[in-house]
Image (cartoon, rainbow, N blue to C red):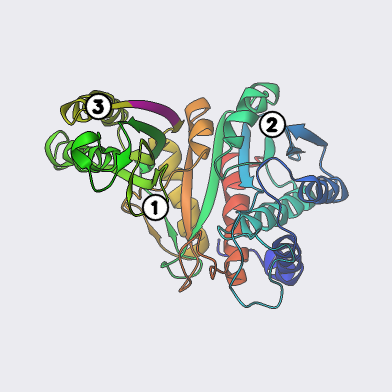
Amino acid sequence: MPVRNRLAEMHPEITAWRRDLHENPELMYDLPRTSKIVADKLTAFGCDEVVPGIGISGVVGVIHGRKTGSGKVLAFRADLDALPIHEASGVDYASKTPGKMHACGHDGHTAILLGAAQYLAETRNFDGTVVLAFQPAEEGGAGGKAMVDDGLMDRWGVQEVYGLHNMPGFEVGQFAIREGALLASADEFEITVTGKGGHAAMPHETVDTTLVASHIVVALQSIVARNIDPLGNVVVTVGAFHTDSVASNVIAHEVVMKGTVRTLDPDLRNLAQERIEALVPLTAQAYGGTAVVDYQRGYPVTVNHPEQTAFAADCAEEVAGSVIRDVKPVMPAEDFAFMLEARPGAYIFMGNGDTPMCHHPAYEFDDNAIPAGCSWFVTLAERRMPLTA
């Protein structure tokens, strides 16, 4: 079945919800307005249960089908938070808060799941229960983990979990998915290099931390070049490099570098961490300095489960007429991974057309994708938990 007629009718209303959220972005777990809007709408739709405060500021809505004898429980997830970015999209509903922007389409995801929630609460054309998880702090705060730790899966007996994310560069409404690793893990490291500062004209009397740190940056690239199978997927990037000097004639006493490691394989993730922690102090020692690594594990690899991936793809094909079933994985990370570690499920990309990539200040969510996204969630519920006579 393609896009549901009722959802097509609701499209202008859902778009208005989305644009209101876009105008009023909130960050991480600090979501008082966003969470209240979601909870109020779920209550107005007639959800059987609406519970705020799951995972600090997440909201859970529960909808029982006309029958519940199947005992099946599916969870659908949307993320709520925006990014600390100053908007440059130029749209007339741009963020009203300088330095905050829905630059990743979470406003669209939230509106889509709200639209699906209203439809499911009206029709209840399924045998089982739908749990709607509106999650805080996807952008670096591990809100998905917070909701799982707060009992999302166990409290409501969730058996499978599904989510979607818009994807610029794909045709609006086009779906793409793959079994296995879809998005990368994301770890962070901070390296503090210490030497002996001094006058730039007398480097022989110093231990030049800028030189030491530069060799460390080069050495880190050898991990991917010479320790990882060429068919593996690993990124090691130093994104920040700061000395304690601001003068051209001073050799810094200390350098602090920050970076990220992305992988699609837990074993390669372990290897990358081991090599960083081994290479960094030895490289510094070779040039007369010292270096300390603070390595922090972040989001795990987002891994789609086989059965649920095939089912999610079939539902997407019903809605859109076609689906890409073996899309290439990408190296950004997604904390839906924590939910997929807790329960089998699948995460799918939905096309967002020709717009700048997510996290860009000129990014824009395409509201034309809304009916397809809503219909996909509805199809998941009605096909996975069909009513029988």
Q: Sequence order check: which comes first, mark 1 or mark 2?
A: 2
> Magenta segment: does it hold 280?
no
Residue at x 66%, y 41% (from the top left corner): 136
**Would residue 214 appear left or right of 292 to someone viewing this image?**
left
Nearer the observer: mark 1 or 3; the answer is 1
Q: Is residue 80 above or below residue 128?
A: below
Q: Amino acid at mark 2?
A: Gly
Q: CA distance from mark 1 to mark 2?
A: 46 Å
Question: Could you say where residue 219 lies in the image, as x and y percent from the top left?
Answer: 19, 38
Q: Nearer the viewer, residue 165 or 84?
A: 84
Question: Could you say where residue 361 lies in the image, as x and y percent from the top left?
Answer: 54, 66
What span is in magenta?
A: 292-297
Nearer the observer: mark 2 or 3; the answer is 3
Task: Give the residue pinned by disc 3.
Answer: 271
Q: Amino acid at mark 3?
A: Leu
Q: Using the rendered image of the protein, determine whether residue 232 is visible from the camera's viewpoint.
A: no
* Quadrant of the image containing the N terminus: bottom right
Q: CA distance from mark 2 to mark 3?
A: 32 Å
Dots 1, 3 in contact, CB < 8 A = no
Q: Quadrant of residue 310?
A: top left
Question: Could you say where residue 328 lies in the image, as x and y percent from the top left?
Answer: 31, 52
Q: Nearer the viewer, residue 320 or 276?
A: 276
Task: Give the residue pinned by disc 2.
Answer: 55
Q: Sequence order check: which comes first, mark 2 or mark 3?
A: 2
Nearer the observer: mark 1 or 2; the answer is 1
Q: Nearer the viewer, residue 365 or 83?
A: 83
Q: Using the rendered image of the protein, determine whether residue 108 is visible from the camera's viewpoint.
A: yes
- Helix, strand or loop at mark 1: loop
